[in-house]
């Protein structure tokens, strides 16, 4: 079984090199020192201890990877068999549905990682099931009956972050009217899920790193360290490695959090499962709403099979719940939300302004992403129209790599051949 994606495997090497460099700095400090005062010795000792901790983390990771690699790879099993094998081993799915190989691989890694208490980093686009995966890890771990505490790092104002995570003493700041426990203390003995970790400001990253290193927290306004024993699962829809290269996310924190790294596939990479997901969520919605499962009019079904689902499984699930709630026996296009409802049976081009409007109730980040997604889609559709559906020509005009362009078209569910016939005469003129 492939335990880590190739990029993550590279990370071990980078981190290993970083560690060697730090050891070299320590060695040369010692080599060239003629005398050392006690405080300096203490300082060097602390550095040596930190290095030992890092080396232990690395060796953990290496042992884990070796153990996993030594096992027979289950990838040649049929998808259903891989799922059944997990079930036979009493794996708790927490409702995670699907036979997509990347999803199953994530579940299999989760199965191995869950009992170890190693930190897990989950990445994937919004709505791909990161939080669900965190619950899966908690449920299959050694602490399933202990607290599971979820924190959205992107939703806490920077000035309240420390108090939210670590708690505060009465009178520590205006408004601190009584002592208060933070999320880490609440998660003691259990699991803390740090969602949207990529949004954590640098000041918060430093504090988090300190907790990961010392396994202690201090409430704001108190000097007293409190030991916390918490399993950390973090999630992000950003590329943390890139953020750490750009300097907006601490590299050392990235390595600390990503001892086990899982990536969840976007729905567009598991489109063949969309009909199964209709049935799955259709039944679930029927049960919740205490009604018969909905039937879909063929043109609605056609639309939903072709739709791009920028919000991934969350969006698909919400759509099925919506139509199950609004429709009588059979759902049709009119039961779709107005912003995605097509005039005919063909997916509509939504303009970016409406994407922003519909996302107004969501976060700014979501609104930006929705608008940029829509702009990208419009750009591609107009471009294809101009070149009469010839992908190679569009790639040339936009100075874009052709396979990247293909990926983008796939992401938006755009088929270049749809632009061929009706526009071929125009594109001929332009050539
Ligand atoms: N594989 C899956 N099977 C069933 N439901 C899923 C799956 N992945 C996600 N979901 C559902 O989709 C919704 C969004 O999932 P969530 O874990 O909150 O996504 P994320 O944290 O990545 O934004 C939730 O209702 C979740 O239960
Ligand atoms: Mg989430």
Image (cartoon, rainbow, N blue to C red):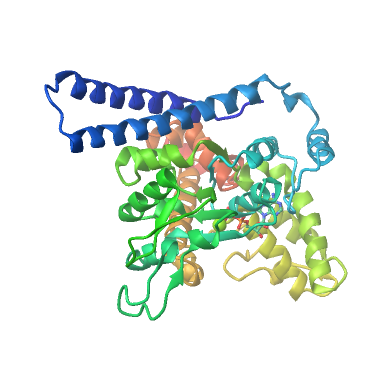
User: Considering only vertical position in the picture, is 291 above or below 80?
Assistant: below
Q: Residue furthest left?
A: 34
User: Considering only vertical position in the picture, is 411 above or below 367?
Assistant: above
Q: Nearer the viewer, residue 352 or 49?
A: 49
Give the left or right position of residue 18, taking residue 256 as reference: left
Residue at image coords 36%, 51%: 205
User: Considering only vertical position in the picture, is 124 above or below 63?
Assistant: below
Residue at image coords 33%, 61%: 223
Q: Nearer the viewer, residue 430 or 264?
A: 264
Q: Looking at the rendering, in which quadrant would you find the N terminus?
A: top right
Residue at image coords 67%, 68%: 336
| Residue 257: percent from left, percent from top | 47, 42
Q: Quadrant of residue 291?
A: bottom right
User: Considering only vertical position in the picture, is 290 above or below 415?
Assistant: below
Asked if one can make out residue 198 in the rendered structure from this viewpoint, the answer is yes
Q: Nearer the viewer, residue 110 or 166?
A: 166
Give the left or right position of residue 307, taking residue 89 as reference: left
Q: Nearer the viewer, residue 292 or 218?
A: 218
| Residue 261: percent from left, percent from top | 54, 37
Q: Residue furthest right?
A: 292
| Residue 93: percent from left, percent from top | 74, 48
Residue at image coords 67%, 19%: 70
């Amino acid at each position: 079984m492939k335990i880590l994606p190739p990029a993550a495997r590279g990370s071990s090497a980078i981190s290993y090199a970083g560690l060697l460099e730090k050891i070299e700095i320590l060695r040369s400090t010692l080599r060239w020192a003629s005398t050392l005062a006690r405080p300096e010795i203490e300082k060097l000792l602390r550095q040596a201890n930190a290095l030992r901790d890092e080396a232990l983390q690395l060796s953990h990771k290496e042992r884990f990877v070796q153990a996993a690699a030594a096992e027979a790879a289950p990838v040649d099993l049929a998808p259903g068999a891989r799922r059944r094998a997990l079930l036979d081993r009493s794996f708790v799915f927490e409702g995670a549905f699907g036979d997509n190989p990347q999803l199953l691989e994530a579940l299999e890694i989760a199965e191995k990682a869950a009992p170890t208490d190693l930190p897990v980093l989950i990445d994937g686009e919004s709505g791909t099931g990161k939080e669900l995966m965190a619950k899966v890890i908690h449920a299959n771990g050694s602490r399933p009956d202990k607290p599971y505490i979820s924190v959205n790092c992107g939703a806490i104002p920077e000035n309240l972050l420390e108090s939210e995570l670590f708690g505060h003493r009465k009178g520590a700041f205006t408004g601190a009217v009584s002592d208060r426990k933070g999320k880490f203390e609440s998660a003691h003995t259990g699991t803390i899920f740090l969602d949207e970790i990529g949004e954590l400001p640098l000041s918060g990253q430093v504090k988090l790193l300190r907790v990961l290193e010392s396994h202690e927290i201090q409430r704001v306004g108190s000097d007293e360290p409190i030991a916390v024993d918490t399993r950390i699962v973090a999630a992000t829809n950003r590329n943390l490695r890139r953020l750490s290269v750009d300097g907006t996310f601490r590299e050392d924190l990235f390595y600390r959090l990503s001892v086990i790294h899982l990536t969840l596939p976007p729905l567009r990479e598991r489109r063949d499962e969309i009909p199964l997901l209709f049935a799955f969520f259709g039944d679930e919605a029927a049960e919740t709403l205490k009604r018969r499962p909905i039937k879909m009019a063929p043109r609605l079904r056609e639309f939903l099979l072709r739709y791009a689902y920028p919000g991934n499984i969350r969006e698909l699930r919400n759509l099925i719940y919506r139509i199950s709630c609004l429709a009588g026996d059979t759902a049709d296009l009119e039961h779709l939300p107005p912003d995605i409802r097509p005039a005919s049976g063909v997916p509509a081009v939504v303009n970016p302004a409406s994407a922003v409007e519909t996302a107004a109730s969501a976060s700014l980040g979501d609104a930006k992403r929705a608008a940029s997604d829509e702009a990208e889609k419009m750009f591609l559709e107009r471009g294809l129209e101009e070149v009469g559906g010839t992908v190679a020509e569009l790639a040339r005009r936009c100075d874009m790599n052709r396979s990247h362009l293909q990926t983008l078209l796939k992401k938006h569910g755009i088929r270049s051949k749809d632009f061929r016939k009706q526009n071929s005469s125009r594109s001929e003129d332009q050539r």
